[in-house]
Image (tube, rainbow, N blue to C red):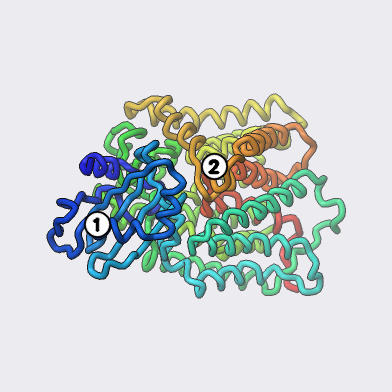
Amino acid sequence: MRRVAAVLAALLVFAGWAGTAAANDLTAPPGLDQVPQNYRLTERQVLAIADKLPAVREARAKEKKSTRSAFLKPVGRWQVSYYDDAEPRHEIAQVQIDDATGAVIEAWTGYKVPWTMARGYDGAFGRKINSPFVWIPLAILFVLPFLDFRRPLRMLHLDLLVLTGFSLAYHFFNVGDIGTSTPLTTPLLVYVLVRMLWIGFRPKDTDRPPDRPLPLLVPALWLGVAAVFLIGFRIGLNVMSSNVIDVGYSGVIGANKLANGMPLYGHFPSDNSSGDTYGPIMYLLYVPFEQVLGWSGKWDDLPAAHAAAIFFDLLTVGLLFQLGRQLRGNAMGIVLAYAWVAFPFTTFATNTNANDALPAALVVAALVAATSPGGRGILVGMAGMTKLAPLALIPLFATFRWQTDKARTVALFSLGLFIPLVLGAAIILLHGGSLREFYDASVAFQSGRESPFSPWGLYDGLHKVQRVVQGLALGLAVLVAFLPRREDVVGLAALSAAILIALQLGLGYWFFLYVIWWIAPVMVALLARDGEPELR
C-alpha cells in the first residue's frame, strides 16, 4: 500500500503556476519505524504529529474514510498527505514538517491543497514587484496626473479608483486570503464592464462639450520623460528580480518544438504538462527569442521568456503611443503610453515574464488599424490565435463602420481574418499535429478548469449561474454587431474591453494577469474621450 500511495502522489499534478513542490520531489521512507538516512524522525513520529492538527482532523471528519502517507522531501522536510478513499487521487489535507525540530511548517486543507498558488507564498509571482515600496508608488503615478481638483466628482476619478482597486484584491491574494480576494475582484470587473458598455453604446458623449481637453496635472512632456524612466525601471526590475511562471515557460517550450519540427500539442514536460493550451501563433512568436537565447530543456532562468515578455510589453507601449497620436495627437500618444507603463499590473505581467502582453498588443494593433477592414481582420485573428478570448471580438470588428458598404467591409475583414486562422492551422498540421489535439488542449481544457480564483470555483452550487453569465457574454459579443453604438475608435475600444471582461466574468479560472487583456482599450475609452491633453 505504501508503494501504491507513493505512485499516486507522484502522479498528482498540483495545479498552479509556480508550484513550490513538484511531485518528483517526494520519496517514500524506508519503513514506519526506520530513521531515513540524514533524517532524525521516523515515519510513525511524523504521522503522529500531523494527525494531531485540528485542521487535519476536521478535514478527515468530512470524509467517510481517508488514508494518509508520509513522504520525504529535500532539505530535511517531511510531507504528510491525506487522501479521500472514495477518490484516491483527491488529496484533502497536506502537512509539511521540519525534520530537525518536528515543527509544523505548513498545513493546508480544502482548495489550498491542490492550488499552491492560493497559499500566499512570498514572491511566487513577480518577486520585487510585490513590494509595497514598488507597487504603491506605481499606483499613485498611474492616478495622479489625471486628477482634476477643480472637478473632484468627475467619473474618471472613480474609474481610476476602481482600476487601482484591483491592487487591493491582489494584496489579499498575495497573503493567501482568497476568500477576500475573489469576492472583491468580481464587483470591480462588473463596474468596469458597465462603464465600458456605457461609453460604447452612447452616441458620442452628447452631454460633454466638444473636444473638451483632458486635464493634466503636469505637462504631457513630463509624462513622456516619466514613461521613459518607468520603461527603464521595469526592464531593470525584470533583469534583477523577476521570475518566469509557467505561462512564459510554455512559450519557450512551444517555440522549441516548432523549431525542431515536433508536434506542438501534447507531450509537454511534466513540470508544465498543460503548457500547450495556447494558440499556435503564441508559440510561433516565441521562436525568435528561443532561437537566439536558447533553452536548456529545464525550467531554469529562461532568458528567452524574459526577452519575449519585455519585447511584447514595449510593443504595446509603442502601439498605444501610435493609437493616441492617431486619435488626439502626440500628447495623447504620450498619455496612453504613460498610463500603460505606470499601471502596476502591466509591470506585474512583465515581472512574471508572462505572455499576456502579446494578445493585448495585438488588440491595440487592431484598434490602430481600425479603418482598414482587412488589417483589423488579420490582427484580431492573430490575437485570437495567441489566446482564444479575442476571437469573441470578431463580430464587433467585422461590423465597425460598415454602414456605407456592408458586404465589402465584411468580405475584406473576413479575408484578413482567414490569413491567421489558416496560418494557425498550418502550424499545427505541418508539425504532425491535429486540430482535435489543439481543441482538446485549448478549448476543452480551459472550459473545464475550476479554481478558487473565480466565484464559480470558490463557492458551491453556482454552476447554473455561471452558464447564464457565459451565455450573456457570448450574446453580448454577437449583439454588439447589430445594436446602435458609438462608431469611432473610442467606442470600438470600449466595447472591445466590455466583451473581454464579460468573458472573464464567466471563467472558472481567472487570474490577475488577465487584467492586462483589457486595460489598454479601457485606457483608450477613458482617456481619449476628451480632446488633446492640456495642463491645468
* Residue under numbered circle 2: 508
Label 1 or label 2, whichever lies nearer to me, is: 1
For badge 1, the amino acid type reads Lys
Residue 416 location, quadrant: top right
Asked whether residue 188 appears in the rendered view, the answer is yes
- 109 in relation to 160, above or below: above
- Which image quarter is the C terminus in? bottom right
Q: Nearer the viewer, residue 399 or 453?
A: 453
Identified at 57% across, 35% down, the residue is 391
Q: Residue at x 66, y 35 (%)?
A: 468
User: Label 2 sits on what residue type?
Assistant: Gly
Q: Which numbered circle lies on residue 73? A: 1
Crowd band around label 1 with a 10 angstrom C-alpha radius: few (<14), some (14–19), many (20+): many
- Where residue 302 appears, as percent x and y from the top left, is 32, 54
Residue occupying the far left of the picture: 37
Q: Which residue is pictured at 62% across the width and 57% down the height?
A: 184
SS assignment at label 2: loop
Mark 1 or 2, nearer chain start: 1
**Taking 179 as reference, is 27 left or right?**
left
Instruction: Name the residue nearer the viewer: 93 or 203.
Output: 93
Residue 17: x %, y % from top left: 41, 51
Residue at x-position 22% and y-position 63% = 76
